[in-house]
Amino acid sequence: MNKKLLAALLCGTAAIGAVSTCALAADTTITLLASQDWVYDAEMELGEKFEEETGIHVDYQIIPADQYYSVLMTKINSGECADIFGGQSGRFDIVTQYNVEENALPLNDEEWVSYYDEYAKAETSVGDNVYGMIYFDTTTDFYMVYNKKLFAEAGIEAVPTTFAEYMEDCQKLMDNGIVPFYECTADGWHHVMWFCEIGGRFEELEPGITDKLNNNEATFADTEMFKTCLEQIKEMADAGYFGDNYQSDEYAGMAYALGSGEYAMTMAKPGTIAEIAEASDGEYTVDDFGMFYIPTLDCQVLNVHPVGPTRFIYSGAEHPDEAKQYLAFLARPENLQYMIDNEPKVENYPFNADQTPAYSEETRAFIDGSESRGTVFQDAIKYLNPQWFDFGQDIIAYLNGDMEAEEVLANVDARRADQAAAAGDEAWS
């Protein structure tokens, strides 16, 4: 059916002024700017349904992850940003990184805010205003995902609980012709999780370190456990446990790499297991995979990550009302369920809309069996998440022998100081 005719029919008996508005919507295209891997195919399918219902077309503008922040800030600073832009949430970062009070519209009056998860709301708000909608599964995080069959074939009887045990298991896998871990540094972000995701372990080893870092009473460079963590990452890479191509491998290839049986482990969200099983062409089922804690620094603390990729409506949006319509459409209970049912990486969303999560028994058992939990450092520490890709580049330089661990950490401190100064943070004054 012709979209203009459909729009007219949808307007029905509305008042003349409303008909005019609705007719205009039929010719409207809203733009959505996002980093790679933030917009799933299932959402694009919903976008087509949204267009059928409203006549509003959604133009998804996807940018490579390692270029995204630079592109986004260029567009915001030039006044030419998309109607909807993606960014990481976090109560510190949405102010210092995106300046949402100036660059995004408040969304308090939107119906979905009434059933938006309180933790998600806190991480996307400034004062009393909600500025963003997390559209990512933040109800679980990235854990160590492993192939039970490959572990058994290599003679590994139990998951490792220390870094030393993990390294021993990696060598057993290597000796059995299996690459232990699928690392993918080409995207610029995945390898940083070895460090940032174990924030709860850092706090466990040095109680109070989070507050000290946030109050400028401690630095990364002067804290020995941070250096040890980087050294362990390098130890894995130097031993060949990431494979020969980890610096060119990409996150998009993860499911196929694990599904092929060539790799035994990766770091991924639980929902990825279904994707891996599907990519294996029947070789494996979801029951062939399990999870354990990220092993750096002998971590046995479940990493909790209440923030994630978020949708903001640009304050200078050409079509702000239509952009709000799109977010409202995505947040409808039936559309949240559509995403859960049709995107393997999504097991739930941070809304209380009576949606049915797709958690597997393995996921529930793993999460419920955790005796200790801790917030990831990118959420807990000021001025860390905004430099994620810079930190990642420095880690690569360190792995390649072009930097020392102390230099990597000193750079983290220097960038934090620069951001603190820009934010007028009194703790750095």
Image (cartoon, rainbow, N blue to C red):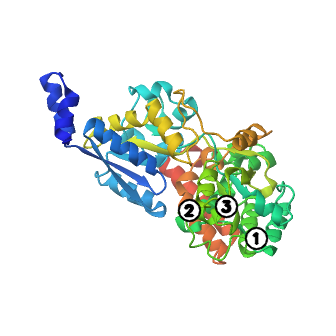
Circle on res. 283? 3
Q: Nearer the viewer, residue 243 or 178?
A: 178
Query: Counting residues from the N terminus, which is met first, the one under dot 2 or under dot 1?
Result: 1
Mark 2 residue type: Tyr
Point out the image quarter for the N terminus: top left
Foreground residue among 152 and 336 = 152
- Determine the residue positioned at 59% across, 54% down: 275
Task: Residue 83: give x, y in percent of width and height.
Answer: 31, 45
How crowded pointer 2 is (Cα within 10 Å; few <14, some 14-19, many 20+) is rated as: some
| Separation of marks 2 and 1 at Cα, in angstroms | 22 Å
Counting from the top left corner in percent of width and height, residue 339 is at 49, 41
* Callout 3 crowding tier (Cα within 10 Å): few <14, some 14–19, many ≥20: few
Would you say residue 216 is visible in this rendering?
no
Query: Image check: 411 left or right of 49?
Result: right
Q: Is residue 142 visible?
A: yes
Looking at the image, which residue is at 64% across and 56% down?
193
Q: Which mark is residue 251?
A: 2
